[in-house]
Image: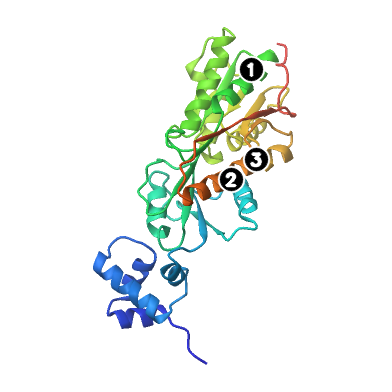
Amino acid sequence: MNRRTTINDVARTAGVSVATVSKAINGRYGVSAATLAHVMEVVADLGYESSLVATSMRRQSTNVIGVLVAEFEPFSLQLLRGVSAALENTDYDVLAYAGTVSAGEHRGWEQRSLSRLGGTLIDGAILVTPTTTRAASSVPIVSVDPHVGANDSATISVANIEGARAATEHLIERGHRRIAHLRGRTDLESAQEREQGYRDALHAAGIRLDPALVADGGYRAADSTAAAHAVLDLADTPTAVFAANDLSAIEMMRVATKRGLRIPDDLSVVGFDDILDAGSHTPQLTTVRQPLPEMGTAAVQMLLEVLRGNDPEPVRMPTTLIVRESTAAPRMP
């Protein structure tokens, strides 16, 4: 039985180190163009197939779509459901890759991920909440919820301003006037738009915005803890909170409950996203639904169009207010 070719065989035949071979086949920095070409030629000659590299060398494609996320959290996992469904009955497989698991840093994660995967392991990439839509890449890109909004053609976004306005108006219609906002990552267009929707709703209702009621939630539960305490520590506490995503909203409810407040009797809370935990939480969370699986499906369809050489228009999808148990009229003094 023939022994399977290993990375050590490639390194020995090419006359380079194993580390250099690893860098070359993973698209990492630190390998000259001449060395890269030589190593990849040896890879093809020896039939080294521990990854998709040899296949891509022969076919000029891998038939793999990369879904690159900063981290695996509920938002991206629901998007992946739509991606997987859209790729059924196609020739493509999907590779999900988290870019900040080791680095732990949001900014620039997509460039690191693309440099490792692009051109050797994937034919195209779906970037989920990237910090830029202009990352250098050897493969076509579609961005979902990008840093700078839907300014480039290959982008999927949602009606953030309209959704945030609907969430805030829902609280105003129930009689709330002291409404706090836990905003999301300030480097993302979605967070800026949701804060704008909150401000627009207050202005339209003639409610003066109190800057003390706006705190940085950061889109992560851990980042929202301090913000939740900050708004509840105010001398004139809010009667309601609109959080820029469901993770922050659920953390807001946890902090409030731990401090002895009842949801929604003492504090109403609205989120944004409609992740699975929103409907299973006690009480169930009122939230603004993003069509997350459908966004994943749309991203795949757009990327396939780009791979065919087309230039699709940006897609902006609607949001829907889902009223559940976490909101009610403010308690009378």
Name the residue at 36% across, 62% down. 27
Disc nearer the start of the sequence (3/2):
3
Q: For the residue marked with disc 3, what is the amino acid?
A: Ile
Residue 268 position in % (x across, y down): 67, 24
Name the residue at 63% across, 48% down. 82
Name the residue at 26% across, 70% down. 35
Mark 3 or 2: the one toward you: 2
Is residue 224 left or right of 135 when viewed as pictured? right
User: How many dots with numbers?
Assistant: 3
Q: What element carries label 1?
A: helix
* Direction front: furthest residue: 309
Q: Is mark 2 on a helix, strand or loop?
A: helix
The residue where tag 2 is placed is: 296
The one nearer the camera, 112 or 305, is 305
Q: Residues within 10 Å of mark 1 (few under 14, many from 20)?
A: many
Q: Distance between the residues labelled 3 and 2?
A: 14 Å
One can see residue 230 in this view: no
The residue where tag 1 is placed is: 169
The one nearer the camera, 185 or 139, is 139
Disc nearer the start of the sequence (3/1):
1
Q: For the residue marked with disc 2, what is the amino acid?
A: Gly
The residue where tag 3 is placed is: 275
Is residue 266 left or right of 161 when viewed as pictured? right
Residue 175 position in % (x across, y down): 68, 12
Residue 279 position in % (x across, y down): 72, 38
